[in-house]
Amino acid sequence: MQLQWLPRSRRRGPEERRQWSLRPKRKLKKSPLRTRSRPQSRRLSRRISPSTTHKESRIVIAIILDSPKIAKTIFSSVAPETKQTSGYRSSTRLDARGRILTLRIQAQDLVALRAASNSFLRFIAAGVGAIEVVAPFYRTRRVHRPSGA
């Protein structure tokens, strides 16, 4: 038996309070839980057409940067993201040769290829943007180097 507390506005006098202050709580109907693992209706799941993108896809992107140093910096910052863990539908390789940064993505389907390429191109763009912001500070910095002896 569950008991319900009454606010002051609904409380009665001392005699009535003894009789009526604690009364059983009414039972509410619970709706069934909806989860993502269970489709809401079978009719809806039948209407969805099968995916046609289950063909393995690949892309190779070569980006020419201003200097080999920038290519190496971008490579070292993005390389940890290429380490593949279980559960991903794509694998990525990144190479830096001279001024050219090469991105190779292989995916199980076109959707995974698009997602991986968008992510890595954004990582590279963010790295280039950060270098462009920071580079002027390093160009104007004068380093005192003692001469000779």
Image (tube, rainbow, N blue to C red):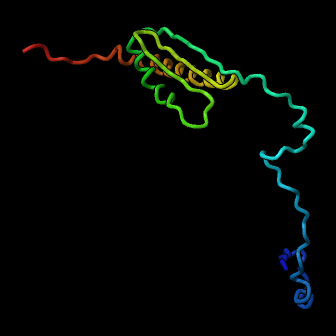
Residue at 87% of width from left, 45% of height from top? 40
Nearest the viewer among 61 and 126 is 61
Residue 146 falls in which quadrant of the image?
Answer: top left
Nearest the viewer among 129 and 54 is 54
**Image spot of residue 19 (x, y percent):** 91, 88
Residue 21 falls in which quadrant of the image?
Answer: bottom right
Image check: 71 left or right of 143? right
Q: Is residue 100 above or below residue 126?
A: above
Quadrant location of the N terminus in the rendered image: bottom right
**Image spot of residue 38 (x, y percent):** 81, 47
**Image spot of residue 75 (x, y percent):** 44, 21
Q: In the displayed image of the protein, which residue is found farthest to the bottom?
A: 15
Residue 18 falls in which quadrant of the image?
Answer: bottom right
Residue at 50% of width from left, 14% of height from top? 102
**Image spot of residue 53 (x, y percent):** 74, 22
Residue at 38% of width from left, 18% of height from top? 137
Nearest the viewer among 89 and 131 is 89
Nearest the viewer among 5 and 119 is 119
Q: How many marks?
A: 0
Residue at 34% of width from left, 14% of height from top? 140
Q: In the displayed image of the protein, which residue is found farthest to the left?
A: 149
Quadrant location of the C terminus in the rendered image: top left
